[in-house]
Image (tube, rainbow, N blue to C red):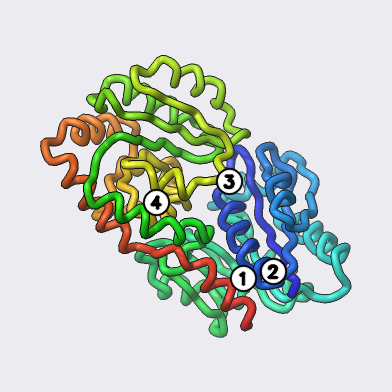
Amino acid sequence: MVVIFRVDASIQIGSGHVMRCLTLADALKNEGANCTFICREHSGNMLALIQSKGHGVVALPTKEANTSLTSQHPRQEYLSWLGATPDEDAEQTIAAIQSLTADKSAWLIVDHYALDRDWEEQLRPYCQKIMVIDDLADRQHDCDLLLDQTFGRDERDYQTLVPEHCTILTGSYYALLRPEFAQWREYSLQRRQQPQLKQLLITLGGVDKDNVTGQVLTALANSQLPNDCHITIVMGEHAPWLESIKAQAQQLPWSTEVRVNVTQMAELMANSDLCIGAAGSTTWERCCLGLPTIMLITAKNQIFAAELLKDKVEIAQEIDEIKRHLLSFFSSINLANRLKVLSETSSKITNGTGSKRIASFLLKN
């Protein structure tokens, strides 16, 4: 079975869209599917990582977006991420598909906030079926399957946005997580029966273009974090503030390390006691492992999911709120109980087997 992904990563977009598609591609590959990614060569792209996983890659050329075409568009920000007009992107994607095979792909999987029904209609003749991965519910789609893995999302949010025949799968039951998260789940939940705060994890996106990590470290420097706590900061190799964070980490009074391109994230999360993390796709990874989290909203498209999670994790919408959370958290008399409650409530959100469920659906349909 041939499956083609149209998805991008960049300094502006971040890495989350590619990472969740890569997780699904790995699950499909394990069942014998042949997966190819069509990605634009933005700064901060992840083409090398995709290739290292054994998947095919077709790179689309990058140019400055024609802002005159999108300046009055209500979705201007997302369109500017594309690096081309939607019509140009459709034309180039069609050419890429035709260069790969004379046969139609079984599935075209689209994960891009800049693309909608108009683009999908142009691609329809070149694939058997179309799957869209979304979490905005803000535009029309021409697809056969739509996935929104947001906790609490109702399929009715999409019923007027997709064709009648489209299957809509919503909720964190379908969260696209790598298999190691399900494998580490039991161990992680077991060690949280006696909570402590010895290992603090900070992960605010692979790119973190606005240097939220640096702001969090500044806030931490004036907190009452236990003296024997170890801090681990995770970043991607394309993070523009990486060297600055390494220098800042050396000035903290606690043992601190900065790790780049971590490949054993499930193990690291399972052995962490508290996380300060972004409200992106890694939210579901933390929930699967019951990792207590102070979650920081770093993009407006994260607000909806964060609101639905407000009773499951600690949420901060601004860096000043992080400071208040840290003061409250580390000075709490009942810190252990607070950690335990957060672990128990978040762990009920997903068990980490969503990728297997989605891969099985695609293979059967």
How crowded is the residue under tag 4: few (<14 C-alpha within 10 Å), some, or many (20+)?
Answer: many
Give the camera-side residue of 125 and 336.
336
Residue 320 makes an appearance in the image: yes
Look at discs 3 and 4 and give the one toward the viewer: 4
What residue would you read off at disc 4? 286
* Quadrant position of residue 345: bottom left
Distance between the alpha carbons at the discs numbered 3 and 4: 17 Å
Mark sitting earlier along the chain (3/2): 3
Count of picture labels: 4
Residue beneath the point at 49% across and 17% down: 247
Q: Residue 131 carries which label?
A: 1
Distance between the alpha carbons at the discs numbered 2 and 4: 29 Å
Check disc 2 and give the amino acid type: Leu
Q: Do the residues labelled 1 and 4 touch (CB within 8 Å)?
A: no
Q: Where is residue 48 in the image (x, y as percent from the top left)?
A: 73, 44
Give the camera-side residue of 327 and 224.
224
How crowded is the residue under tag 3: few (<14 C-alpha within 10 Å), some, or many (20+)?
Answer: many
What residue would you read off at disc 2? 108
Residue beneath the point at 27% across and 29% down: 323
Check disc 3 and give the amino acid type: Ser
Q: Residue 15 carries which label?
A: 3
Check disc 1 and give the amino acid type: Met
Distance between the alpha carbons at the discs numbered 3 and 2: 20 Å
Which image quarter holds the N terminus? bottom right
Check disc 4 and give the amino acid type: Arg
Helix, strand or loop status at disc 4: helix
Residue beneath the point at 32% across and 55% down: 189
Q: Position of residue 82 (x, y in %)?
A: 67, 49
Q: Do the residues labelled 2 and 1 touch (CB within 8 Å)?
A: yes
